[in-house]
Amino acid sequence: MTINKEKDEKQELAKRLSRYSVKKKISTALGLIFRYTILICIGFIIITPIYTTFKEGITEQSMLGFGNSAWIPPATSWQSFWEAVLILEYPKGLIFSILNTLVLAFLQTACAALAAYTFARLKFKGSGLLFAIVIFSIIVPSQSIMLAQYTSFRNFDILGIFKLIKGEPLNLLGNTASMYILAATGMGVKGGLYIYILRQSYRQLPVSIEEAAYVDGAGFLKTFFKIVLPEVSSSLLTVTVLSFVWNYSDKYFISLLSGDLAKRRQLSLRLADVQSNMRWAIQDIQSKMPAEYVINWESPLIQKGVASACAFLVILPLVILYFFVQKRFIQGVERSGLGGD
């Protein structure tokens, strides 16, 4: 009887384990299906607009508006892209936009790295209040301080020095230096967010690493540049990429503070200008087009096709950038929310 009872208990246990393993496999499979469904849907939402702009730009202009092919163009032509290159003055605009954005991204990253390390490691009276102001700068829309920024750069002065030398404050409106000043002082595009991301990355690092460096004779700056910054390189790359993307696509600061050259060359602002009046933009470049292309600036469908080509050319550098840095970028995003000792 005892032997039979033990056998029955083992069989019951085996059935329970079998049911548990089946339930676990089913739940795991359902979790994977749900996860990949969400990822595929998000990917579709992100990729579809990019592909649509490219498809409309490469479709032959006489075939635009045909509904017989939703995903593959019935006939292809580079005419819309030719027109987009001429309308945007693309080579000059691309060089200016990239160089200007690189300077802004470098200044913002340098400022955020120093400020974030101060908030993460140095405790002083009022540090909590200052960091609260940084968080507040993330929440407050840039447009709400537009008048104050405009007035400050219209009458720019540092402790009355410029007024003492020149007799009046400097007028930095229409000067790209005003954007560089904002970037270098942490008040550029999303500047508070970069400080927050890097502060979280610094807090993840063990303090013992820096203490060991101090014991070995390294000073504050040497420890920061030789030990701390290499450890948070992924987060630095994340901040640099975010700063580059947002400054590259920014229209607010460019239109408010920059001069005529920047307004004419910056691709994001140039795209916004031509999209509002695409008909005349196409008409202006018709004499520069190759002879084999027939120019029609009155058709709304053709205007939309050229506008799509312009939009694709503007976002193309950002897509290429993401392909090169996506792995390190994602690592930096993952590590930015962790805390250390």
Image (spheres, rainbow, N blue to C red):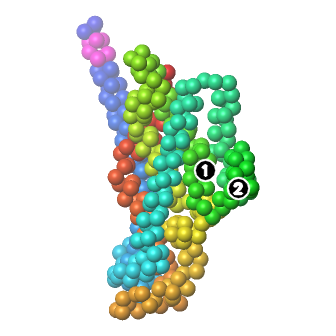
Q: Considering only vertical position in the picture, is 49 above or below 8?
A: below
Query: What x and y, as percent, mark residue 339?
Result: 50, 28
Circle 1: element type: helix
Q: Considering only vertical position in the picture, is 200 above or below 151?
A: above
Query: What x and y, as percent, mark residue 155?
Result: 73, 56
**Residue in view at x 43 percent, y 27 percent:** 223
Q: Nearer the viewer, residue 54 or 277?
A: 277
Query: What x and y, as percent, mark residue 63?
Result: 40, 86
Q: From where the camera sits, is residue 70 visible?
A: no
Please tell me how crowded label 1 is: few (under 14), some (14-19), or many (20+) other residues with Cα within 10 Å. some
The amino acid type found where label 1 is placed reads Leu
Please tell me how crowded label 2 is: few (under 14), some (14-19), or many (20+) other residues with Cα within 10 Å. few
Q: Which residues are magenta?
A: 4-10
**Residue in view at x 38 percent, y 83 percent:** 79
Q: Nearer the viewer, mark 2 or mark 1?
A: 2
> Which circle marks residue 166 in the picture?
2
Mark toward the start of the polypeptide (2 vs 1): 2
Q: Which residue is mark 1?
A: 182
**Residue in view at x 71 percent, y 44 percent:** 159
Circle 2: element type: helix
The amino acid type found where label 2 is placed reads Lys
- Left or right: where 107 falls relative to 325: right
Spatial CA span between label 2 and label 1: 23 Å
| Quadrant location, the N terminus | top left
